[in-house]
Amino acid sequence: MIFKDYYKILGLQNNKVTMAEIKTAYREQAKKYHPDVNIANKKYEERFKDINEAYRVLSDSISKRKYDRMWNRNVGRKNASYEESKRSKDSLFSDFFTMFFGSVDENKPKVKNKKAPSKGENIETEINISIEDAFRGKEQTIGVRTVEGKLKKFKVFVPAGIQNNEKIRIVGQGKAGVHGGKNGDLFVRVKIKNDERFVLDGYDLKTNLYLTPWEAALSTKVTINGINEDVSIYVPAGIQSGEKIEIEERGYKDGKGGRGKLILDTKIMIPKHPNEQELELFKKFNEMSKFNPRNS
């Protein structure tokens, strides 16, 4: 079996060529030796078959690598000539081609390398939810724009105690897969918004505790509305505005079965429109009291 120099057949000097150069060389040689141009010329007809055979091997990256290993071993030898390699009668491919690349069903169309399945891209969107809804859990409907621009609606269940910026995964609702791959997923990022009552700080909930001057001056018991229950506390006598009262296990869920703190920020309020009796009491207190916060 004689080695065939496919690069020489295509008019190329060596194997240091690109796929584009191989394609260009093939077109030039095929045009030159095409049977329609050289009618009834057996030599040109055989050369044209060699050109097609060479291009079939060199245009495929896998077969080209296999051939290049042989080319590197055989190029330059005296017997490295394409004319000496025989082909079976009526076959488009020589014995050399069949020996190294297997028999070919010439009537069967060439099948391109099948690309591997690839999963589709994930999609991410976000929703805003109140602290109380996040604490208790809530089902919410969201709309997501598809690649075609259509609005697709989904029902999302936000689990109780979800954390701020945590994502909810909806399997298979992302972009379509490629070459038979699975669809991507939809990720919904949950944004927990503070409201007029509560501010979320980690697992702690912060809120204001409004007191009258006499409640602040005297030790008193007050009841406030927590996020999930009423909370009763004793306010120490003489508490000042801005002082904090911390209540354990009455804050936000920590994801481990516990809860953070409920932190109360004291705000002492006076009546905007006191009645006559209240004004009289304030006057008497002002006359009798020696307390001056500016001198304390």
Image (tube, helix red, strand yellow):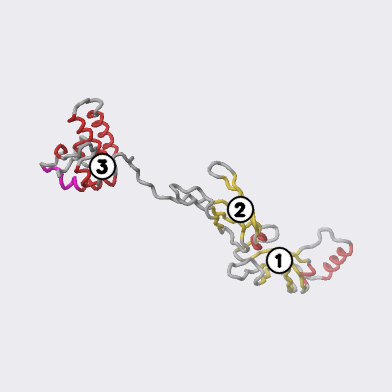
Say whether disc 1 or disc 3 marks the residue closer to the N-terminus.
Answer: 3
Q: Which residues are magenta?
A: 70-77
Answer yes or no: do the residues labelled 1 and 3 have beta carbons within 8 Å? Answer: no
Q: Which of these two is toward me, 145 or 235?
A: 145
Is the residue marked by circle 3 packed among few (<14), some (14-19), or many (20+) residues within 10 Å?
Answer: some
The residue lying at 84 percent from left, 58 percent from top is: 273
Answer yes or no: do the residues labelled 2 and 3 have beta carbons within 8 Å? Answer: no
Q: Nearer the viewer, mark 2 or mark 3?
A: 3
Label 2 to label 3: alpha-carbon separation = 56 Å
Q: Which residue is mark 2?
A: 127
**In the rendering, at what x and y percent does residue 195 appear?**
68, 57
Residue type at tag 1: Gly
Q: Which residue is mark 1?
A: 226
Say whether disc 2 or disc 3 marks the residue closer to the N-terminus.
Answer: 3
Residue type at tag 3: Val
Residue type at tag 2: Ile
Q: Quadrant of residue 98?
A: top left
